[in-house]
Image (cartoon, grey):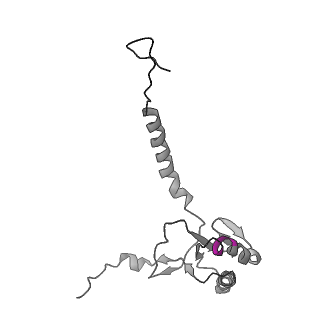
């Protein structure tokens, strides 16, 4: 404890907030740097479409990924096709979360349909598909609407 400079008998009872503010500021900087790294996910070459939209930023959804080799991931955890239905029941249906599917553009159509069938068998009625927006749609200027 620090002593008051006016007298040797009294203790300083005021709290010094400067070290606390330094700590909070440093934690904020670390969080701001590490947060984008945590949302990277798996590397998938998504197909392109004109009507692509951003994924919602909330955490009430899971992402089902099918990579180029046909492996299936729920978020970052690999799941076998045989276990996918039960896994999706526990994580999506029971917890009432939304499910979005990312499939590599080179994955055969049959694999994607099989995964979608497993999701349907698990009781998922709404499955969002993730795609990238075409380069033409990104560069094309929007025309003003006629009234």
Q: Which residues are magenta?
A: 90-94
Q: Is residue 92 above or below residue 17?
A: below
Q: Is residue 53 above or below residue 7?
A: below
Give whichever of 59, 107 is nearer the camera.
Answer: 59
* Residue 130, image x, y percentages: 53, 76
Quadrant of the image occupied by residue 38:
bottom right
- Asked whether residue 71 appears in the rendered view, the answer is no
Q: Is residue 38 magenta?
A: no
- Asked whether residue 5 appears in the rendered view, the answer is yes
Rendered residue at 50%/21% (across/down): 1
Rendered residue at 59%/76% (across/down): 101
Left/right placement of residue 79 relative to residue 100 reads: right
* Residue 89, image x, y percentages: 69, 75
**Tally of marks:** 0
Q: Is residue 93 magenta?
A: yes
* Residue 63, image x, y percentages: 59, 71
Q: Main secondary structure of the magenta part?
A: helix
Left/right placement of residue 45 relative to residue 20 reads: right
Left/right placement of residue 124 relative to residue 1 reads: right
* Residue 92, image x, y percentages: 64, 73
Q: Residue furthest left?
A: 147
Left/right placement of residue 6 relative to residue 32 reads: left
Which quadrant is the C terminus positioned in?
bottom left
Rendered residue at 53%/52% (across/down): 34
Rendered residue at 48%/38% (across/down): 23
Give whichever of 145, 104 is nearer the camera.
Answer: 145
Quadrant of the image occupied by residue 104:
bottom right
């Amino acid at each position: 404890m620090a002593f008051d400079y006016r007298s040797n008998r009294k203790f300083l009872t005021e709290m010094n907030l400067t070290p606390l503010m330094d700590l909070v500021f440093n934690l904020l900087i670390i969080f701001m740097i590490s947060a984008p790294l945590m949302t990277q996910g798996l590397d998938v070459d998504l197909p392109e479409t004109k009507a692509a939209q951003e994924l919602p930023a909330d955490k009430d959804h899971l992402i089902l990924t099918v990579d180029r080799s046909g492996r299936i991931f729920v978020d970052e955890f690999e799941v076998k096709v045989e276990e996918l239905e039960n896994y999706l029941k526990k994580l999506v249906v029971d917890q009432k979360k939304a499910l979005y599917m990312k499939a590599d553009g080179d994955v055969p159509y049959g694999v994607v349909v099989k995964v979608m069938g497993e999701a349907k068998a698990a009781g998922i009625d709404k499955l969002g598909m993730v795609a990238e927006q075409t380069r033409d749609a990104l560069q094309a200027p929007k025309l003003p609407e006629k009234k």
